[in-house]
Amino acid sequence: MVSEDHLKAAKQRMLDQHLRSRGITDERVLAAMERVPREEFVPAPLRGRAYDDRALSIELGQTISQPYTVAFMAQAARLEGHERVLEVGTGSGYGAAVLCHLASEVYTIERWPELFDSATQRLERLGFHNVVTKLDDGSLGWPEQAPFDAIITTAAAEQLPNVFRDQLAEGGRIIIPIGELSGGQTMFRITRRNGTFEEERLGLFSFVPLVCQS
Ligand code: SAH
């Protein structure tokens, strides 16, 4: 059994040493990372390691992204609380849960039925009500719910799926790791301004692949 005290201390270390000291300065993001119980999103044997700053294995060879990466992407999306956000790659549901505290509506898509089912149940059990989950190929976006103020992709793409630009609201941001799947990927922020798309490179990361059927 992992004690509550252990988890509390580990969470505080995550906030101070892995997030604040590495440049996560958005207080809303830090508060969201504090509120979400990451231990509920990892397989039971890994509960004690939930707040380590590393990606952990979940089902089907997929991963729950490391806390720093989740916080980095959330901060990069510049959310103020009123936004509609699309997340591609629900995985464990952890990233979606963090986004629930930062935006008004979260739409999240997962391609594997087992992950979709367990994340949907987990988010409901933990009381996240401003999230809608969908089982589908997220590289198609979610046209019925577009436009989005932010589109956050938690799997690596070789290139930006075309439809993401079309589904982005004016002023909206796409946060997506792009690059060769074997090496690392560059995190991009693509901002829509007056119909043009401004690209910024935010650093190097390593993600599982975005699998596109289309
Ligand atoms: N945000 C997740 C991280 C998941 S890792 C979390 O916090 O746990 C990336 C996820 O993207 C995996 O679950 C993988 O199955 C999913 N994925 C990969 N390609 C996809 C696609 N085309 N559409 C939807 N989900 C996809």
Image: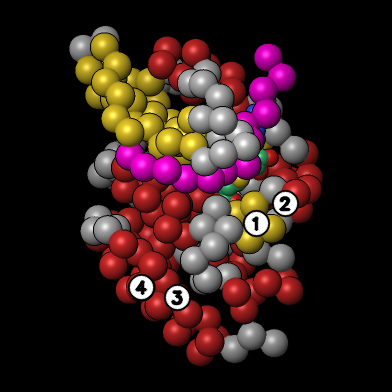
What's the residue at 53%, 45% (across, down)?
206
**Vertical position of residue 53 compared to residue 168: above or below:** below
Q: CA distance from mark 4 to mark 1?
A: 28 Å
What's the residue at 55%, 53% (across, down)?
65
Q: Main secondary structure of the magenta part?
A: loop
Q: Quadrant of the C terminus?
A: top right
Q: Which residue is mark 3?
A: 11
Disc 2 on helix, strand or loop? helix
Disc 4 on helix, strand or loop? helix
* Label 4 vs 1, first from the N-terminus: 4
Residue 206 is covered by the magenta coloring = yes
Q: Which residue is mark 2?
A: 118
Q: Which residue is mark 4?
A: 17
Asked if the residue at label 4 sits under 8 Å from ligand 1, the reply is no
| Three-letter code for the amino acid on which mark 4 is drawn | Gln
**Vertical position of residue 199 compared to residue 47: above or below:** above
Q: Nearer the viewer, mark 1 or mark 3?
A: 3
Contact between marks 4 and 3 (CB within 8 A): the answer is no
Q: Position of residue 68 (x, y in %)?
A: 42, 58
Q: CA distance from mark 1 to mark 3?
A: 20 Å
* Label 2 vs 4, first from the N-terminus: 4
Tell me which segment is drawn in magenta.
Answer: 202-214
Q: Which residue is mark 1?
A: 122
Q: Nearer the viewer, mark 2 or mark 4?
A: 4
* Label 2 vs 3, first from the N-terminus: 3
Contact between marks 2 and 1 (CB within 8 A): the answer is yes
Q: Quadrant of the N terminus?
A: bottom right
Q: Nearer the viewer, mark 2 or mark 3?
A: 3
* Label 1 vs 3, first from the N-terminus: 3
Q: CA distance from mark 2 to mark 1?
A: 6 Å
